[in-house]
C-alpha cells in the first residue's frame, strides 16, 4: 500500500528540497499548500490568507487519500510547525490505515538566515515566485514553530 511522507521544519530549512528527493526516490506526488496559495493568490491573499491556507490544507488531506488509494505515495510539503498539526496528521492517516512518516529538516540559525537572504534575493531578481520573507514574517514563523522532539520524527536531519 502507498504511504504518506511529511516534511517538518521552519520555512527555508530545505523542506521542498527534501520533498523533491522523496518524490524522485519513491515515485511520489508532492502536495504543497504554498504551491496552491501562490498559484491562486500570487502571495496576495491579504487578511484571508490563514482561512485559505486551512481550506487548502483540508483539500490536500482529502486529495492525498485519493492519490494513496490509487497506489501512489504522497509527500506533504508543508511545515507541520506545531505538535498539534503533527499529531493530527498522524491520527488522520493512522485512522485510514495509511503508513506515514515524518522527516524533520533542521538548520542552525545562521544557515537559516543565509537561506532567507538568498531566497529574498532570488525573488527580487525574478528567479523565484516564493514568498518574500521580511523580518516581521520571519519573527511570526519563529514564534509559531515548535521544534519536534526526536521521538515524533521517523527521520531527522540537522
Image: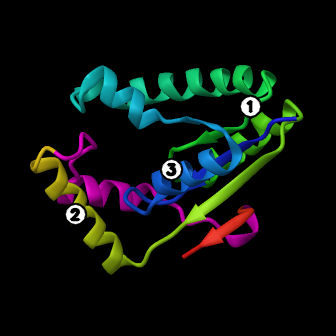
Residue pointed to by mark 1:
72
Task: Give the x, y percent position of residue 142.
Answer: 37, 62
Q: Nearer the viewer, residue 126 or 10?
A: 126
Whether residue 90 is situated above or below residue 154 in the rendered picture: above
Q: Which residue is mark 3?
A: 79
Residue at 22% from the left image edge and 63% from the top image edge:
118
* Residue 46, numbered circle: none
Task: Give 135 or 12, whichever is nearer the viewer.
Answer: 12
Label 1 vs label 3, nearer the camera: 1
Residue range (magenta) = 127-152
Say what secondary structure mark 1 lies in. loop
| Disc on res. 118 | 2
Q: Earlier in the sequence, mark 3 or mark 2?
A: 3
Residue at the spot 74% in from the left edge and 31% down from the top edge: 72
Horizontal and vertical percent position of residue 83: 62, 54
Q: Which of the 4 image quarters holds residue 128? A: top left
Q: Which image quarter: residue 75?
A: top right
Q: CA distance from mark 3 to mark 2?
A: 19 Å
Height in image: 154 above or below 61?
below
Residues marked 1 and 3 touching at CB (< 8 Å): no
For marks 1 and 3, the one nearer the N-term is: 1
71 displayed left or right of 130:
right
Amino acid at each position: 500500500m502507498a504511504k504518506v511522507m511529511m516534511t517538518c521544519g521552519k520555512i527555508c530549512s530545505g523542506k521542498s528540497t527534501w520533498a523533491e528527493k522523496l518524490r524522485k526516490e519513491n515515485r511520489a506526488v508532492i502536495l504543497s499548500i504554498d504551491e496552491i496559495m501562490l498559484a491562486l493568490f500570487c502571495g496576495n491573499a491579504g487578511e484571508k490568507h490563514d482561512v485559505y491556507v486551512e481550506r487548502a490544507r483540508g483539500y490536500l488531506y482529502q486529495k492525498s487519500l485519493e492519490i494513496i488509494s490509487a497506489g501512489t505515495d504522497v509527500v506533504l510539503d508543508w511545515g507541520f510547525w506545531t505538535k498539534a498539526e503533527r499529531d493530527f496528521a498522524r491520527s488522520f492517516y493512522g485512522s485510514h490505515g495509511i503508513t506515514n512518516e515524518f522527516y524533520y529538516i533542521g538548520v542552525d540559525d545562521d544557515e537559516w538566515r543565509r537561506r532567507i537572504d538568498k531566497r529574498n534575493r532570488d525573488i527580487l531578481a525574478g528567479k523565484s515566485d516564493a514568498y518574500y520573507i521580511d523580518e516581521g514574517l520571519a519573527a511570526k514563523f519563529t514564534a509559531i514553530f515548535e521544534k519536534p522532539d526526536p521521538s515524533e520524527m521517523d527521520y531527522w536531519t540537522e
